Image (cartoon, rainbow, N blue to C red):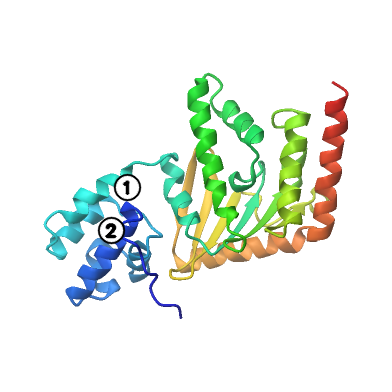
Amino acid sequence: MPGPRKLDPSSSPRALLGAELRHRREAAGLSQSELGAPLFLSGSFIGQLESGVRRMQMDQAEKFDEMLSADGFFVRNCEALKKSKYPDHFAEAAEAEARASTIKEYAPQLIPGLLQSEPYARAVFREYQPTAATSVIDELVSARLDRAQILADPTQPMLWVVLDEAVLRRRVGGPEVMAGALRHVTELVQQRRIIVQVLPFSAGSHAAMGGGLKLMAFSDAPPLAYLDGLGSGQLLDDPSAVAAYGLTYDLVVASASSPAASLALIKSVAEDYEHEAEQF
């Protein structure tokens, strides 16, 4: 089993808290389970805090200060974690995503954020906030494109996405935007940076009809599952729940077209959008 990740305390407030929590816990002679018990947190959750996968909450910081005689260290530094460029319901998931070694996602309606082109992301946010100032939309788009920088690494994370066919057919931003967005996805596939499959309408009913699903695995922490909803999200670390959603994803993959057939379909739909855009 891999050893604890060596965190650089200067790299981020979360890395600082994780490194300090591990140091003080070990100095106090406590196991991860013993430290978590008074807060009804599992030992694996404490491990995720120490490795920087999970975000420390203020009530947890207060208890750690008390248990580890930290003189307010965790409370003071926990304040920095409140600042995020992502919505509250997604902030912790986005931060975990950046540390994941493997990401598997089923997208029922939209191209996943990590794969969105700039015009596509802008069209999505404009639909979400039709009366927002341009500067607000610019900030949201910038944050989304910054997230996608994790794909600049040629090997990690390993990203495997299943797109519902509705993602290809739903006209976000018009034919020109859709053509560019799908071309962006095909380029990532052809660069062998990601794996993409399409779940066709012909597959009928399937295991994930309830909504979007993201699974994240880590080299030094237990896996997480993220359930996506309308203006909401749920990050799960319970092993049985994560395993159940892993099976859900596997069932969706089993119903999806092969990567080769999926790429051919995406290209074909992109061409249709391109021809339509040329007519205007």
- Up the image or down, 200 lies above or below 269; here it is below
- Up the image or down, 253 lies above or below 57; here it is below
Residue 197 visible, this orientation: no
Dot 2 falls on a residue whose secondary structure is helix
Q: Return the x and y of residue 235 as percentages of the image width and height.
A: 46, 54
Residue drawn at x 82%, y 34% as measured from the top left? 273
Kindly check if marks 1 and 2 are in contact, taking CB atoms under 8 A apart as contact.
Answer: yes
Q: What residue type is labelled 2?
A: Leu
- Up the image or down, 23 lies above or below 227; here it is below
Residue 87 visible, this orientation: yes
Q: Return the x and y of residue 152 as percentages of the image width and height.
A: 59, 54
Q: Residue furthest bottom?
A: 1
Q: In this view, does 185 lie to the left or right of 112?
A: right
Q: Return the x and y of residue 67 as percentages of the image width and height.
A: 15, 64
Q: Name the residue under label 1.
A: 81
Question: Whole-Å distance between the Cαs marked 1 and 2?
Answer: 10 Å
Q: Is residue 119 left or right of residue 179?
A: left
* Nearer the observer, 113 or 147: 147
Dot 1 falls on a residue whose secondary structure is helix
* Picture mark count: 2
Q: In this view, does 48 lie to the left or right of 213?
A: left
Q: Name the residue under label 2.
A: 17
Residue drawn at x 25%, y 64% as measured from the top left? 21
Q: Mark 2 or mark 1, which is nearer the start of the sequence?
A: 2
